[in-house]
Structures are given as C-alpha cells and as structure tokens.
Amino acid sequence: MGKTHARIDGRLRTFIEEQPMFFTATAPLSGDGTINLSPKGLKGSFAILDELTVAYLDFAGSTAETIAHLRENGRITLMWCAFQGPPNIVRIHGRGEPVFRDDPRFKDLLGHFPGIDPTPHGLRAIVVVTADLVRDSCGYAVPFMTYDEDRDLHSKRFAREDDASLSAYFTKKEHIARSIDGLPGLPLPLPPTSV
C-alpha cells in the first residue's frame, strides 16, 4: 500500500503540485506541549525547490504555532490528500525553517512563487522544508470533495495593512510573538522585507 520515495519527482511531484491545499503538523519538544495542525492553501503559495526541498508562504493569521515549533526544533510533516481522482496521500516528514522577511535569502526564495502576489496577504515568512522521509499511502478512506476556488477573504482582510499596522495587529494577538506553550514565535515588530 504505502511506498517510500527517494525524492520528490515524476508522478509524486505532479500530484503534490496539483493539490489546492495541504496540511502542516508540528509540535514542541515538551511531551505535554500543544500539537499543531494547520491547513494551507491559496494557489501559488507552495513551491518545490528541488527533489528534497519544498517551501510555502506563511501569511498573516491569528497564531504562529508552526513558526514557534520550527524555531524550537525544526520538525514538520506536510500532507496532501487526493480529494479528486485516484486515492492518494503523500507525506513529507522533514526539517523546516521559517525564513523571515529581513533574511538575505528571502528575496531569492520569493522568486519561486511567481503565481501569487503575496502583498495583500500579510506575508510573514517563507517556510522551507527539507525532506527526511517522503511516503505515499492509499487514501482509500479520503472522501471525494470538489475544489471550487480560493476564498478572497484573506486578501480582502490583509490588503489594507502596511508593515506598521500589521505589526500592531500581531502585537494584539495572544499567540503570535509567543506560542500557546510560550515558545518564541514571530519576531515583532515585523521585520522589514529585504526585497
């Protein structure tokens, strides 16, 4: 049923790139810490950088759990499900790093996302994940669901923000600068964009 892949290429790469959403899972090192699972979407916000490295744009939201966990320990799993077509689930288990807007690598990484304008979404970081293990499995129990289109609510909400107002918004949120478990989250004030 399941198969381990040496790299992200061919049929596997095509499958991942065709999915309109994926999930990220992270956790702190503490055994009683809060495990986080997040859906990710918005067409053009995910990119395969090479056969073992992927990245996605981390946009404004009400928490920064994934960033906090990656800053502490780097562990992350990404998962895609086939909601249409043949059943399939793909997981990338690996090490992730949030690359913040003032990082010298940010500009080059942003070039991997030509299919989306990140400006109206409050771009906080680019999360880069290096795969340690790539596996697929059957997905027989995943239901059929249709993708209609991306919601426009995120860009409508955050398009009116500049760096100062976005930093103020994040500062008011309880779990942006610090995670639910008190780990360092998003650096505030929001770092300026290095582009």
Image (cartoon, rainbow, N blue to C red):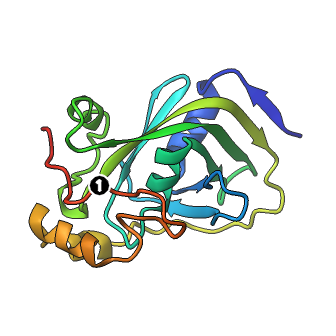
Quadrant including the N terminus: top right
Of 128 and 41, the residue lying toward us: 128
As helix, strand or loop, the secondary structure at mark 1 comes to loop
> 32 above or below 98?
below
> 179 above or below 77?
below
Look at 63% across and 50% down and name the residue there. 79
Look at 62% across and 50% down and name the residue there. 80
Q: Is residue 191 left or right of residue 8?
A: left
Look at 27% across and 50% down and name the residue there. 116
Picture quarter containing residue 152? bottom left
Look at 66% across and 39% down and name the residue there. 93
Of all residues shown, which one is farthest toward the right? Answer: 1
Give the image location of residue 78, x and y in percent.
60, 47
The residue at which mark 1 appears reads as 187
| Mark 1 Cα shell of 10 Å, populated few (<14), some (14-19), many (≥20) | some
Quadrant including the C terminus: top left
Q: Is residue 26 left or right of residue 110?
A: right
Of 82 and 185, the residue lying toward us: 185
Give the image location of residue 3, x and y in percent.
81, 32
> 109 above or below 162?
above
